[in-house]
Amino acid sequence: MPLSPSIHLHDRIPMLNRWHGNMSARDVLTQTLSGKAGKVALVSAFGAQSVVLLHMVAQIAPATPVIFVDTLMLFRSTLNYQKDVAQTLGLRDVRHVSPSTDDLLIHDVDGLLHQSDTDACCALRKVAPLQTALEGFDVWITGRKRHQSATRADLPLWENDGQGRAKVNPLWDWSNGALDEYMTAHNLPRHPLVAQGFKSIGCEPCTFRTTPGMHERSGRWPGAAKTECGIHFPPIQKKD
């Protein structure tokens, strides 16, 4: 169901959740990417499970803009994996965005902000560049899932991002098992760090290996209460 510009975003979100709630992820993506009411982008970190959503989008509409935020603190493995996946899947419009040089010189000239204020570092290197990159888009697609953390347990399929755009999470109800089965069935390339014990992969200084039995996101900002980088806040509608 295309997003009609005549219906206010606040009213469209619950309608979309009702219409699409029982659809498969692929069907949700097909309808979202075939809509003519607005521009749609996929935001991907090319992390541990990102290839599932990237593969679906590549199969449906390979020219879909894919926004990849390079914080300039990513693992070299992630940068190499991004190139490999984009080429393998035939993604035609991967857009690399990074923090501005001026902002870095003002707020993090020595590259050590993450040691004193992780929230400020994420805001500088990830949130601000992404918001700039999303200008001009009406809808963005994310790979978030309910099982990933307590803060995502009530994740809806469709959300209002608080900036005048709709946000859709097609894999919201997928389990780790379902994701692994999909990757195996389609022979998709795996992020090389997963085999080394990294279940959730972000910036190199703030990402650590996990041991068996630990939650997949426990290796992100370990020892801190922080579980999100901030690009998905504020959540205007947690659940419809």
Image (spheres, grey):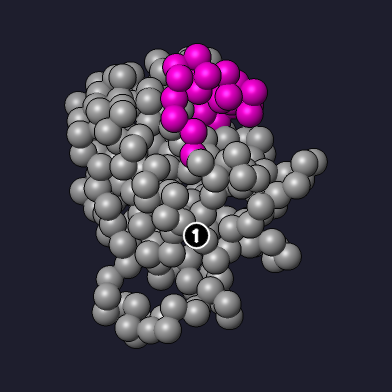
Q: Amino acid at mark 1?
A: Cys
| Residue at horizontal 26 percent and vertical 79 percent from the top | 102
Let me know if residue 97 appears in the view. yes
| Residue at horizontal 60 percent and vertical 39 percent from the top | 195
Taking depth in this image into account, of 32 and 74 the one nearest to the observer is 74
Could you tell me which secondary element the residue under label 1 belongs to?
loop
- Residue marked by disc 1: 203
Crowdedness near tag 1: few (<14), some (14–19) or many (≥20) residues, C-alpha within 10 Å: some
Residue 129 x %, y %: 32, 61
Residue 142 vertical position relative to residue 124 in the rendered view, above or below: above
With 40 as the anchor, is 154 left or right in this view?
right
Q: Which residues are magenta?
A: 171-191
Residue 131 x %, y %: 33, 57
Residue 114 vertical position relative to residue 19 in the rendered view, above or below: below
| Residue at horizontal 34 percent and vertical 78 percent from the top | 104
**Would you identify the image quadrant in which residue 88 lies?**
top left
With 198 as the anchor, is 79 left or right in this view?
left
Taking depth in this image into account, of 114 and 155 the one nearest to the observer is 114
With 136 as the anchor, is 79 left or right in this view?
right
* Residue 174 inside the magenta-drawn segment: yes
Residue 72 x %, y %: 37, 64
Q: How many marks?
A: 1
**Would you identify the image quadrant in which residue 74 lies?**
bottom left
**Would you identify the image quadrant in which residue 178 lies?**
top right
Let me know if residue 238 appears in the view. no
Residue 12 vertical position relative to residue 60 in the rendered view, above or below: below
Residue 17 x %, y %: 48, 26
| Residue at horizontal 20 percent and vertical 34 percent from the top | 92
